[in-house]
């Protein structure tokens, strides 16, 4: 939502809440887009949230609001509601959203809510919950249109019109055999341009792009984006069509995964987005682990420097160039790992090209190291005089080593992790920087003590 | 595309190309998804690319392929084609894709191609090109269905069926007044559930979410994602409906912008994704600028250290803790700026909360600094003995300063840039790290010289 719209809605809601203008509040809430309400909800105090929620009369709107709210706010609101109230809300939610909500509830509560739902609905939810988190099976919905191969175009149109009441927007028409196995797909457009008696079998596309229930949601999103689909069919082990994943959920996945990538690269663990209302303690908790790794790395680096104390005391100016040698290595490492990670995430790099990619990054690191190493060498000579030319040589060589090493290491690591199916974004950031720091310092002093006494 | 599928297609294409099996190649190409061809195209040598392109007989498939290829590969292919050939291809492309392609051509060439197009098509393209890059006006398509308010539901259904031949998938039906100004929107579902004589005016939603032609594409994507839309109408200064932006283009925008954010945070400038075929020189070029900034920062840091050479020579062990003090500041700075940048990009932080956000990050920085500073202080005492307790005090205090400062600075900077409508991602990464480095070193030695002689 545009910030100005959000601000107006928030201010109006607060003013009306303060004045207790119930009638106008009800009116405003009913008129507002649920997505807008969901956006301002986190900015209200929890007492305000509860009062506002009580004013939403339309159970469908309430359900939509709950579908859109962030997990932590939703959990807080659910705590003050009875099992019956929760069950009433989830009745109007789509089954993938219910599954996501149920998964955040304590076991006892989850069971109580599921028991109060219609049997048909709760079974659907149970099926989704049987699949792992972040897979196609978990985020699919069962609202698809599937017809036998022998159906005529005319019959298909009639079915679509009848089912419109149930399905917000039929994206595609799927064709299945007698066992419910996915056979083909027909676009709505084809249906109306062929003679009405044509059987679906003769107009369907048979090379349907589908995913398995166990496919990772990031891969699902990549496939939908790659083929510009509005929905993708999900099949089980027997190729039975069991659901579809729609493009709006795919967008959520892409946004969440992108945010996760950015935060992981920066060394923040755990789920997702910046949440303004998240407690400071929780934020600290998410940042502690990688900082601890960096801290340990720093302590190791301090031992390395300590080890070369004698070298350093012979030429105290060496200390002046420690920051730049380490910093440049760290920076080129971050650049490299970020571009590899995004390349893997968007499918621009695949594992057939590992050697080429690493060789490429090695070359880039070396070239950059050479340029900036030469510059630093010249600078050192200018500053400390050409009498100390060996200092210039040492810092220049150290810079080349540090940057080449950093680029190579930062390209290998994500590729290796990706091969072993570990998310490469996790290992980047502080880890690459820390290892690079230690190696840079080590090489720097090794080179220095080789050339010293100056 | 899944890596295995891509590999099989690539290998098969290469084998058939080597064997000159033209008939089988034609068959394979015709059968393949264009998106798949576009994915393997960059992995072929340019001679192979040209031979393959010559085998694509269907001009529509060729057009789709050109729509999907990355800019640099497309440019290379276009160079060896005549103006007429290019004009024939773009005839079958949607106008937003033509505009994107034309924008990459030299002026002379662009003019020649546009002249060879049908007048109606080239006018459409001209209109798009009149808008700035990366705005709604540039990525919209004119294929929408707009009907007057007085149209009945029955008439609307008839129009939709006639227009199906032209429009791949009508997402929504827009309602306009006599002047073509956007008045409302009707979902396809509503059309079939109301009595056929109902006028659109009485069933349309009037609070249509729309964007202006000048709206930034990232904002357009955010709005489409926020309201879970399949398409969003674009209006001009007079509120005339001039186009729609569809969800498949929105996904591309979201992916590109996320990649750009990641790369910018890591200090890589310029457009987008990791392109395997991009020359090493070009990659180096993209990484040089920020590294230069970091280099200059490193040189400044070397002056700072040089300035405190006396302090350092009195207690050479101070050098051992330089890396950890600087590194921890840099890490917490990166964490902070990354979470703020994504918060801004996904709309979780808005500018009404600037003070709160900064105060929050300041507190987080201080707490983290306190914890890790205390740990470092204890470590220093253990290692160098409690006789040198002042060293422990110095490193502990320096760590607190460094981390608090880094977190505060890294939160202020993106917020300030965002307020001045500069992309906050640009200024992160190396810039934050570099400034933090200099400030950390400065404070470290300031504190040290205050407490020294030990």
Image: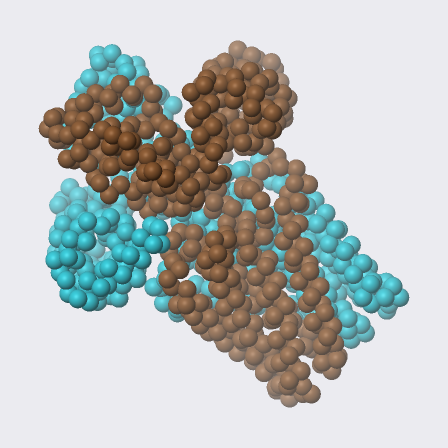
Chain colours: A brown, B cyan
Which one is nearer the viewer's eye here, A344 or B376? A344
Image height check: is A274 above or below B155? below
Which one is nearer the viewer's eye here, B340 or A337? A337
Which one is nearer the viewer's eye here, B243 or B65? B65
Q: Quadrant of residue B282?
A: bottom left
- The residue at 66%/45% (across/down) is A285
- Residue A42 seen by the camera: no
Left or right: B244 with respect to A153? right
Q: Position of residue A357 (x, y in %)?
A: 41, 65
Q: Position of residue B62 (x, y in %)?
A: 18, 52
Q: Position of residue B438 (x, y in %)?
A: 65, 63
Q: Quadrant of residue A282?
A: top right
Q: Position of residue B61 (x, y in %)?
A: 18, 49
Left or right: A363 with respect to B213? right
Count of numbered circles on the image: 0
- The residue at 24%/63% (across/down) is B14
- The residue at 38%/23% (across/down) is B207
- The residue at 32%/38% (across/down) is A239
- Residue B262 seen by the camera: yes
């Amino acid at each position: 939502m545009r910030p100005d719209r959000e601000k107006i809605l928030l201010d109006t809601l607060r003013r009306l809440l303060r004045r207790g203008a119930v009638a106008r509040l009800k009116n405003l809430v009913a008129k507002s887009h649920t997505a807008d309400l969901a956006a301002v909800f986190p900015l209200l105090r929890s007492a305000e949230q509860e009062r506002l929620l009580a004013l939403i009369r339309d159970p469908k709107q309430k359900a939509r609001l709950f579908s859109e709210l962030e997990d932590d706010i939703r959990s807080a609101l659910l705590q003050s509601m009875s099992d019956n109230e929760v069950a009433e809300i989830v009745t109007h939610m789509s089954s993938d959203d219910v599954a996501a909500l149920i998964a955040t509830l304590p076991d006892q509560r989850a069971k109580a809510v599921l028991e109060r739902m219609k049997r048909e609905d709760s079974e659907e939810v149970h099926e989704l919950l049987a699949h792992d988190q972040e897979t196609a099976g978990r985020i699919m919905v069962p609202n698809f249109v599937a017809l036998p191969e022998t159906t005529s175009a005319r019959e298909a149109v009639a079915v679509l019109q009848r089912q419109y009441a149930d399905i917000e927007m039929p994206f595609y028409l799927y064709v299945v055999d007698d066992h419910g196995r996915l056979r083909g797909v027909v676009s709505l457009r084809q249906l109306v341009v062929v003679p009405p008696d044509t059987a679906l079998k003769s107009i369907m596309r048979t090379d349907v792009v589908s995913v398995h229930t166990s496919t990772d949601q990031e891969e699902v999103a990549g496939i939908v984006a790659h083929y510009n689909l509005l929905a993708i069919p999900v099949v089980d082990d027997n190729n039975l069509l069991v659901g579809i994943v729609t493009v709006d959920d795919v967008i959520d996945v892409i946004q969440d995964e992108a945010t996760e990538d950015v935060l992981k690269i920066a060394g923040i663990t755990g789920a997702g987005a910046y949440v303004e209302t998240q407690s400071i303690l929780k934020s600290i908790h998410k940042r502690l682990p990688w900082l601890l790794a960096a801290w340990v790395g720093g302590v190791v680096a301090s031992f390395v420097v300590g080890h070369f104390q004698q070298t350093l005391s012979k030429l105290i100016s060496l200390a002046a160039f420690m920051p730049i040698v380490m910093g440049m290595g760290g920076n080129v490492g971050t650049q490299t790992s970020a571009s590899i990670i995004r390349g893997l995430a968007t499918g621009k790099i695949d594992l057939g090209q590992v050697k080429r990619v690493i060789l490429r990054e090695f070359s880039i690191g070396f070239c950059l190291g050479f340029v900036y190493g030469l510059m630093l060498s010249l600078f050192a000579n200018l500053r400390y005089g050409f009498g100390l030319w060996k200092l210039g040589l040492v810092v220049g060589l150290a810079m080349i080593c540090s940057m080449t090493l950093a680029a190579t290491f930062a390209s290998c690591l994500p590729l290796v992790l990706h091969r072993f199916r570990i998310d490469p974004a996790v290992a980047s950031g502080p880890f690459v920087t820390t290892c690079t720091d230690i190696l840079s310092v080590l090489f720097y002093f090794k080179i220095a003590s080789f050339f010293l006494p100056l």
